[in-house]
Amino acid sequence: MTLNLEVWEDKNDLYSRAEELFSAQLKNGATTFGLATGGTMIPLYEKLRNSSLDFSHCKSVNLDEYVGIPQGHPESYYTFMQHHLFEAKPFKATYIPNGVAEDVHAEALRYEDLLKSLTVDMQLLGVGVNGHIGFNEPGTSFHSETDVVELTVSTRSANARYFDTIDEVPKQAITMGIASIMRAKCILLIAVGEEKRTAIKALLRGDVTEDIPVTRLCNHPNVIVLTDLKMN
Ligand code: GLP
């Protein structure tokens, strides 16, 4: 397993390190970044916005999008990305699944084809409390590609903080599959906060199981994990 763990107890240092990894990728000629949403990414995108890094020749592909809420909805991942990154740091092209496509299954297939036409130099990942990556919930096949998925109660409750009531949290999403994610040349996983300890411990234990999707990363040749959690 080629998993590089870096523990940064100071969150500001952790996010500076993440920014540095983006900078190093650009210097090495990276042109395609896989991006992620979630509270974990907000301080990173703030750093990128305030940096002198230039992504205007790069492409981005996002991991996932809710089904059923339009792009302009305040909690769509489209809006999240515009607000936290793209308005300040334009990319040559940005891709995110269309969660209100007439046929969401066809949209998932289209997105997977798009991914296959690209080479993702670095994929940014957060992790759910239950170990999900993208919106690939526990039990998802490691062979999964981009698809329409049902969200678990655990994930909908965790994300309910962004909506007025839990009933407003979408029940489905379009997400890159685990196999789609694994094609990236390098993966940068960021896990901040005590509630992510169980997932990160499982990853570091190295017991690869579909019950904890993040453990699949043990089989990837180039993963960097940044966390504020001291591991013992
Ligand atoms: C959502 C996203 C994931 C993200 C996870 C954790 O479910 N689909 O990509 O990693 O939430 O979010 P947070 O960073 O807010 O804890």
Image (tube, helix red, strand yellow):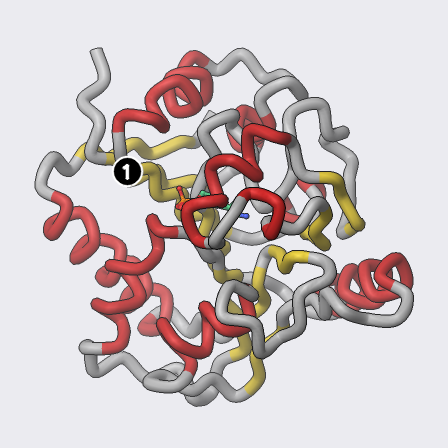
Residue 139's quadrant in the figure?
Answer: top right
Q: Is residue 26 above or below residue 187?
A: below
Residue found 21% across the figure and 67% down from its top: 47
Residue 142's quadrant in the figure?
Answer: top right
Quadrant location, the C terminus: top left
Point out residue 18 in the picture as x, y percentages from the top left corner.
26, 55
Q: Is residue 109 above or below residue 27?
A: above
Q: Is mark 1 within 8 Å of ligand 1?
A: yes
Residue found 42% across the figure and 80% down from its top: 86
Q: Answer left or right for 108 relative to 171.
A: right
Point out residue 204 in the picture as x, y percentages from the top left corner.
39, 19
Q: Nearer the viewer, residue 6 or 162?
A: 162
Q: Answer left or right for 81 relative to 141.
A: left
Point out residue 177 in the picture as x, y percentages from the top left corner.
71, 45
Q: How many marks?
A: 1
Q: 10 Å neighbourhood of mark 1: few (<14), some, or many (≥20)?
A: many
Q: Answer left or right for 95 relative to 121.
A: right
Residue ID for mark 1: 192
Give the residue type at disc 1: Val
Secondary element at tag 1? loop
Q: Answer left or right for 56 relative to 101.
A: left
Residue found 79% across the figure and 49% down from its top: 148
Residue found 60% across the figure and 52% down from its top: 168
